[in-house]
Amino acid sequence: MSVTGACLCGAVRYTLKDKPKETGACHCDMCRRWSGGVFMSVKCKAEEVTLDGQKHIGRFKSSDWAERCFCNRCGSVLFYRVTASGPYHDDHHFGFGTLDNPNGIPMTSEIYIDKKPDGFAFKGDHHTMTEAEVIAMFAPKD
């Protein structure tokens, strides 16, 4: 079953081939500044998404391994894309709030948990990773 989403103005729309099975939350400094809080997202591979309105997608290289994409008309946060080579290359992490219907997708993980503001708390048990663990996941293997 596919799911759809869009930016605030509708200039960029997307369709995910399958309904995501989970969402995750990131508390890193960049996600916090980019999204205005915690960045919650659903992940898919590039071949599993259809993007409409690509001329309205702005891209910002935010690190050595990723870029952040947004609508260049309304400024909506759209997705984070892994640019580094390796097993996560071209993974897209779409903002949970951009989904047309985000119901029925459980939160299963939080990353950069050691950067989480003390006023944030999510209900339930889920997998967590620290900043060092996340960076090690993307570090080049010698």
Image (cartoon, rainbow, N blue to C red):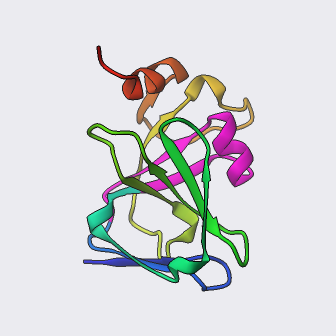
Q: What residue is at 54 percent from the left and 23 percent from the top?
A: 131
Examine the image and state in which quarter residue 49 appears.
bottom left
Examine the image and state in which quarter residue 108 appears.
top left
Estimate the x, y position of residue 61 in percent, counting from the top left.
59, 47
In the picture, the quarter occupied by the C terminus is top left
Estimate the x, y position of residue 29 in percent, counting from the top left.
69, 35
What residue range appears in magenta?
20-42
In this rendering, the answer to whether 123 lies above or below 133 is below
Residue, far top: 142
Q: Is residue 39 magenta?
A: yes
Tell me: 55 left or right of 23: right
| Of the pair 105 and 111, the residue shown nearer to us | 111
Q: What residue is at 47 percent from the left and 69 percent from the top?
A: 102
In the picture, the quarter occupied by the N terminus is bottom left
Tell me: 112 left or right of 48: right
Q: Is residue 43 magenta?
A: no
Q: What residue is at 74 percent from the left and 45 percent from the top?
A: 33
Q: What residue is at 50 percent from the left and 72 percent from the top?
A: 99
